[in-house]
Each structure stands twice: as C-alpha cells, then as structure tokens.
Amino acid sequence: MPQLVRVIGIGAEGRHGASDGERNASQRFTVDVEAVVEARDDDLATTADYRDIVARTREVIETESHTIIETVAERVAGAVAAVDGVLSCRATVHKPAAAGRLQADDISAEATAERP
C-alpha cells in the first residue's frame, strides 16, 4: 500500500549557481523530500529506507554542479525516485545564502519525478 515519507531539512554543501563564485565556493543547501513508497507488513525490506533517500539527496547536492536551482531540484527528485521502494518523489531545494543576499525569507525550487 503506498505511503508518504517526508524527510525535511536535509542539509548539504554544494556548488550550484549562475555565477563563478557560487560554483567555486561551497554553500549550504537544504532539501525537503516527500517520497511515495510502497510499504507492507511492517517490514523494512518491503519499503524504501529513508537513510537511502537522505544519502541520494546529499550525493546530488555534494557531487554535481548546476547553474539553476530548478535543475538541482529535478536531479534530486530523479535520484530519490530511483531508490528501491520509492514510487515517486517531490523534492524542494532551498538556497539560504541566496535568500539572505536578497533579503528574502527563502529561495527554493520544487520538482517531481516518478520511478524510472
């Protein structure tokens, strides 16, 4: 039976942005993930392990570099949707340093992906 798992505030350092400075110097990103998972029989073997969801999220943020935050969100959603047991994913990537520079509360992008 499909269930929703949320992991909110996954922190990671990444090099994403439109300027050379953003791509050359690491900055903090936070990611909120909502994953629809298959869950049966109160058994971890029948569902997605949220530790894998967190690991995939951090892997994208820490090892890739993209110009726009929308692409980062798209890549995270796709990577999480590929985790065993995940049926679909919605990922929201927050860029706190950019928000602070603009005196805004938040800058974020959201993307969704289905299991490949």
Image (spheres, rainbow, N blue to C red):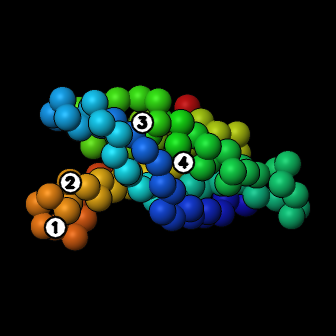
Q: Which mark is residue 98?
A: 2
Secondary structure beneath label 4: strand
From the viewer's perspective, tell me whether residue 14 is left or right of residue 43: left
Residue 71 visible within the image: no
Secondary structure beneath label 1: loop
Given contact means CB atoms under 8 Å apart, are the residues at marks 2 and 1 in contact?
Answer: no
Q: Quadrant of residue 30?
A: bottom left
Of callouts 2 and 1, the N-terminal one? 2
10 Å crowding of disc 3: few (<14), some (14-19), many (20+): many
Which residue position is annotated with label 3?
75
Of callouts 3 and 1, the N-terminal one? 3
User: Gap in Å between the C-alphas at discs 3 and 1?
Assistant: 25 Å
Residue situated in front as seen by the camera: 41 or 13? 13
Q: Quadrant of residue 99?
A: bottom left
Instruction: Residue at the far front: name it.
Output: 25
Which residue position is annotated with label 4?
88
Residue situated in front as seen by the camera: 41 or 71? 71
Q: Residue at x 61, y 48 (%)?
A: 53
Instruction: Residue at the far left: name it.
Output: 102
Which residue position is annotated with label 1?
104
The image shows residue 7 at horizontal and vertical percentages of 56, 62
Q: Residue at x 87, y 58 (%)?
A: 43
The image shows residue 94 at horizontal and vertical percentages of 33, 56
* Amino acid marked by disc 4: Ser
* Amino acid marked by disc 2: Ala
